[in-house]
Image: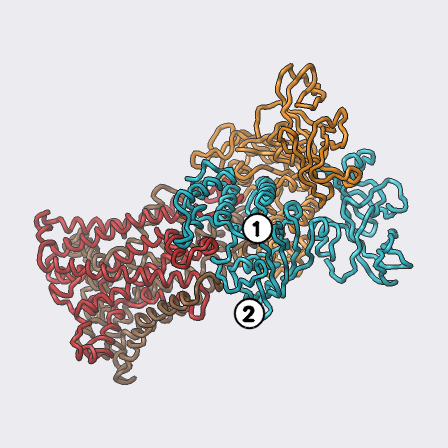
Chain colours: A red, B brown, C cyan, D orange
Amino acid sequence: MKRAGDPLWLRVLLIAVSTAFLGLFVLLPLIAVFAGALRDGLGVYLRALAEPEAWSAIKLTLLVAAIVVPANVFFGLAAAWTIARFRFVGRSLLTTLIDLPFAVSPVVSGLIYVLMFGLHGWFGPWLSAHNLKVIFAVPGVVLATLFVTFPFVARELIPLMEEQGSEEEEAALVLGAGGLRTFWSITLPNVRWALLYGVILCNARAMGEFGAVSVVSGHIRGRTNTLPLQVEILYNEYQFAAAFALASLLSLLALVTLVIKRLAERKVAREKRAGLSLEPSLEH
Amino acid sequence: MKRAGDPLWLRVLLIAVSTAFLGLFVLLPLIAVFAGALRDGLGVYLRALAEPEAWSAIKLTLLVAAIVVPANVFFGLAAAWTIARFRFVGRSLLTTLIDLPFAVSPVVSGLIYVLMFGLHGWFGPWLSAHNLKVIFAVPGVVLATLFVTFPFVARELIPLMEEQGSEEEEAALVLGAGGLRTFWSITLPNVRWALLYGVILCNARAMGEFGAVSVVSGHIRGRTNTLPLQVEILYNEYQFAAAFALASLLSLLALVTLVIKRLAERKVAREKRAGLSLEPSLEH
Amino acid sequence: MSIEVRHITKTFNQHQALRDVSLAVPNGELVALLGPSGCGKTTLLRIIAGLEEPDADDSARVLFDGQDVAERGVGQRRVGFVFQHYALFRHMNVFDNIAFGMRVKPWRQRPRRGQIRDKVTHLLELIQMADLGRRFPSQLSGGQRQRVALARALAVEPKVLLLDEPFGALDAKVRADLRSWLRRLHDELHMTSLFVTHDQEEALEVADRIVVMNDGQVEQVGTPDQVFHQPTNTFVADFLGKVNLFHARVEQGKLVAGALVMDAPASGAAEGQAAQVLVRPHDLLVARVADDTAALPAKVTRVISTSSVVRVDLVTTDGQTLQADLAHEAFAPLALSVGDAVFVGPRRSHVVVDDYVI
Amino acid sequence: MSIEVRHITKTFNQHQALRDVSLAVPNGELVALLGPSGCGKTTLLRIIAGLEEPDADDSARVLFDGQDVAERGVGQRRVGFVFQHYALFRHMNVFDNIAFGMRVKPWRQRPRRGQIRDKVTHLLELIQMADLGRRFPSQLSGGQRQRVALARALAVEPKVLLLDEPFGALDAKVRADLRSWLRRLHDELHMTSLFVTHDQEEALEVADRIVVMNDGQVEQVGTPDQVFHQPTNTFVADFLGKVNLFHARVEQGKLVAGALVMDAPASGAAEGQAAQVLVRPHDLLVARVADDTAALPAKVTRVISTSSVVRVDLVTTDGQTLQADLAHEAFAPLALSVGDAVFVGPRRSHVVVDDYVI
């Protein structure tokens, strides 16, 4: 769509400004990380990754993601479907609260778990009486990550589900399909790409979360340090090459996430177009 | 819209699960922060806020937000308009890159600025030769925050602008309005509520950012500590009441953000409805 | 299967979409629910399908073959439903769309794989799309999509077929083709069918019986001939096609409207009572010279000869606009052109005594 | 102001929406661009308005009053454009919508505040919405919105009015009303107007001249009478209304199609040449007894008497379906019903020699 109405200089300017901004503040820094990681050669790089503490951080990060992502897919799907399909009291409150983790500082997100589950917290005495540890332990890391990454799945699904409407689901119900069958055969396939996108973003965020996790983890080396925490520790100890080596893993994760996002976005766009009815106004 | 097709138990279950999840993981923790802040009484609370270091952190946080938010509104609007209105080579790359700050770990975001502007970074020597400090100084905090909060404005605007299409803008152009006039009179008012929502979310995020800022700020008390950093320092020094007092400010910010969001969402929904043409299918 | 609804009321956010509607559709008929947008016709259709529930009311009933189906869920009513915007499953091809209803049946009733294939193949032939089973909905034209939607609804052998503005989203030309196709299909299958439309031409052409609705209520039920030629009120008359309206008064057993004097209907209207005289355009006589029937002077404002009749727009001396449709052979000797002075009058008319004002 | 386009081609992603289209619209006429969806009519309208640019080509021209406007931006062409979906400014009320075009004029040409108010008030009266200036677009019905869109376009006193499917999104009844309103408005203002439609009835009723388009090309340009009664090919004939088509062959100076023998047209077709004989439904004679004209045996399949004519659907012995439209008076003595055997033939016909197949 080339619009004859806008002067050429304006279009060129806008495209140039946006691209330059992204290049300067987004693309260039990313290249810097890989450059920094490989500064002292590939051998140093690989050795840094093989350190026991680094390995432990990688394993913990994968464990957290393996718990958090499925949980948030489940809750995200339930919340999105509930909001997009039903009208009920509290619906708008639910919609608003979904964004709370975006609005609140990660430090605060971490602190509230300390307040609840810490030694002097609400459930602290009960937990220590039963010899359960949440804060400064893996469960705390999981809970904090769960909280921070909650919005990603639901936020991707809600607008798409609302746009697609419920006609296809109604058609399936009239044809005799049950509620669950309709969900699996119609609802889920229709949002699969948006769901995929939400999942990978949720995953990237779960693996990369720093603030909230930093507060609840207690930075116990080899035990409760995730990748981002380990990066900070190495950085604070001036082990720059090692810090950047681990950071490059996180950057790689970000890049893979964006590539999958790119593919998913195309599919979503195609499915949106496919869903449009043939209106005369679409003619060109 | 009550759908006769779905069994009642399913609806009740879904609503209950979503609400319980949010209540347990979102609402309850928030209450905990305020309870923690006021545990030692209002006097202690107010004294904690009046500490010089706390004051300095508050002022720095406001300063960062005052720079970052307008900058991101400008760049976000430019990027959103460019993406929603023009087709050009690299458009899809631009769209994808907008989400990069979501996909990358905050620690990595901070590190890349260190890599570029730190003492041993790419521009380090040049900066120190000219006696300019970016890392461990306010400019670094601003840059890191700018990067992390970039997606919020653009992501709110792009889908709305694409959905609204360009017919109203075309109508204005045919009526003789110039490109700039069309932007101010038609484009901007049509997205004002989504823009407001993007701005407040960007603001909440800018004030609450922790990971990236933590890496670049150097934690210099009274100089480069923002509110979230100050909270962490107090917390690590076991000054819990003071930590929660400052944390309550951030929580208050989150709540205000959500309230404004709620209002903006209603307006956006109303404007979407208002924009719909009267189709027979809308009959009820 | 016959359908009957009794005392159905439906309220959306304080807006009454349906007000105490009762209606019976005999077995095997093709019935149109006709009315302007917002009149509640789609809501009524969705209530019959079970996609909406009527307001709670002890006397509200939806009966299929005399049996109350209130307790039956939408999947148990065995209705075929065709949505205005097709609602095809976008991620399934045409074959899978049509087969869906058979595949989701409970295990015992589910046809075998081969039976499903045969049935779908048969339906694809019925909708003249035998080669297109592997296409996806996005690769089909609007008319094809609507036919697939119909085949999908027929695949589960419903007792009743419900169609919501089935041709509303299509081009005029395609619409006309699909219309007669639907009529032929109904003549073959003879399934009780109910379709919603806002297009009176569509209803008049296709339906055995028309239910004219307005503002949540049924205005008239009748055959196309009845609702067109003997409307019970001016809303129905006006909605079903162009009509010329004369406000008359009963004087000495005659109906008088300005220069026109017409016989009053037998159903004795009282002296002085007001009445509306409705004259369809083809019943309006146009003459160069005044006579007993064509007594009202008028002037030709526009002549359109591009259809099966020549349409002559007229304006009377007191500013009323009228329309006369003349056969081409009747028009030829008159050779009217814009500005000509003529006299008009009703060859045949229909009188309504009500207080409805257009 | 007259409009002329020459050799316009437009390609979207390898798809040729327009192929070397040339067209002239005389000053003051109301012209319809008619064609099926996807034929390129909207694209042509948008190119004239300046909202799209034609493919670069030295011979491509858009001329207003003979002057090339290629260099003039969309805001400098002084056209009024009405969008199918109204494109009203949703955050402005009706008054501000209509005033917008005047308020954005350069400072020197801008009318004073009072003048703007007077002008808007006048336009609100013109569209019969004098009291609704403070309403917002969302508070208006579809018909009202379209009238506001028209008033907004007229407010800047354009030299040309371009309308893109102006009534496409409206109900049948509202559409018919707005149609005659647009015609009256044009008769008052006499501004060169070009409107896009896919509805042949709309084009035939409203336009002075019709441009029939198909697949990116112009098929025929002519008055409604010309394109309806003398189509140049079967596409035009078929698109403009129901037509009965007989495939005939020239034999000994006559056109022969089965039992029908008709006079060949003067424009001497060669012996043995194939030709299409087009007969509009109202030109198809129906008789109980065969004669010279009505020689083809057929059977009645459906009778619809709910319009200004009685439509009789027929099928010939070799399976061809035909449609005859009879005046109610002509139908009455025949008293046909479904299943009756009759004879049909053309009272008047139009012969086309081309290779287009429907």
Neighbours of disc 1 within 10 Å: few (<14), some (14-19), many (20+): many
Q: Position of residue B213 (x, y in %)?
A: 23, 63
Instruction: Locate the N terminus of chain A by quadrant.
Output: top left
* Front-most of residues C81 and B159: C81
Query: Residue at image x 29%, y 77%?
Result: B32
Q: Which residue is mark 1?
A: C165
Mark found first going from the N terminus, 1 or 2: 2
Query: Residue at image x 66%, y 30%?
Result: D316
Q: Position of residue A256 (x, y in %)?
A: 25, 49
Q: Which residue is mark 2?
A: C56
* Front-most of residues D308 and B44: D308
Q: Do tag 1 and tag 2 residues touch (Cβ < 8 Å)? A: no
Q: Amino acid at mark 1?
A: Glu
Circle 1 or circle 2, nearest the eye: 2
Quarter of the rendering containing residue D208: top right
- Vertical arrangement, residue A210 with respect to residue A15, above or below: below
Q: Amino acid at mark 2?
A: Ala
User: What's the chain of the residue with tag 2?
Assistant: C
Callout 1 secondary element: loop
